[in-house]
Amino acid sequence: MPEPKTGASLLEPPVGISSARNIQEIKGVIDPGAIDGNSRLAIIMRGLPGSGKSYWVRQFIQELPARIAQNVTERGLCSTDSFFYQNNRYCFDIARLPEFHQLNLSRFIEALASGMPVVICDNTNMALWEFAAYQAAAKALNYRVHIQQIGDVRSKIHQRECAKRNKHGVSLNSIQRMASQFQRN
């Protein structure tokens, strides 16, 4: 089984996203400073590749108390993309996508079961079924669930921006196909 890549290198800011705006956005929904070792918060990210999901996550983690931020970065940040890294290079293999989605869900559930105060699913989650198991597991283990969508998935302008700035080379056609599958909460 491949080891997932973790840490800040997965969380580089996309072009055109303002740090201040995102910190305000985060504090408007959840106060990271109020999170402590007894908190039980699951965050499920939604958005196109290149929308700024991982950047939002990085900004959120930076606002957490240091000890919690380190634990979340090391064990509570769950992204299927992390399994595609080999020797610090992203190597997408569509044949392994179902396997890696399952491994990511397992890692998410393990983090919940261990009592991590914050557990984050950082995937695109275009259709509701894609994150239903994450949401159900979090609720079953008495976590508050927050679903954070980044960007207007239906906007053609947003789709073009995402195609330009996503770091995995996802084409505009693929992004448009993903956007057409988007289901609202």
Image (tube, rainbow, N blue to C red):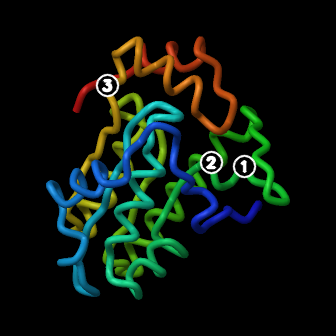
Using a 10 Å C-alpha cutoff, classify the residue at mark 3 as few (fewer than 14 neighbours), some (14 to 19) or many (20 or more): some
Q: Residue 105 location in percent, x, y?
A: 50, 55
Helix, strand or loop for disc 3? loop
Is the residue 120 above or below the residue 48 in the image? below
In the image, taking residue 66 as reference, residue 141 lies left or right, namely left
Distance, label 1 to label 3, CA atoms, is: 27 Å
Residue drawn at (37%, 34%) of the image: 129
Residue corresponding to mark 3: 152
Q: Which mark is residue 1?
A: none
* 172 or 74: nearer the viewer: 172
Amino acid type of the residue tagged 3 in the rendering = Asp
Disc 2 is placed on an element classified as: helix
The quadrant where residue 170 appears: top right
Q: Earlier in the sequence, mark 3 or mark 2?
A: 2
Dot 2 amino acid type: Asp
Distance from disc 3 to disc 2, alpha carbons, whole Å, reads: 22 Å
Discs 2, 1 touching: Cβ within 8 Å? yes
For the question of whether residue 61 can be seen, the reply is: yes
Residue at horizontal 30 percent and vertical 54 percent from the top: 20
Spatial separation of the CA atoms under disc 2 and disc 1: 5 Å
Quarter of the C terminus within the rendering: top left
Q: On residue 84, which mark appears? A: 1
Q: Quadrant of the N terminus?
A: bottom right
**1 vs 3, front mark:** 3
Q: Nearer the viewer, mark 3 or mark 2?
A: 3
Q: Position of residue 16 (x, y in %)?
A: 45, 37
Q: Which residue is mark 2?
A: 81
Q: Is residue 113 left or right of residue 21?
A: right
x, y percent for residue 66: 40, 85
Residue drawn at (67%, 36%), measured in percent from left and top?
168
Q: Amino acid at mark 1?
A: Phe
Upstream in sequence: badge 1 or badge 3: 1
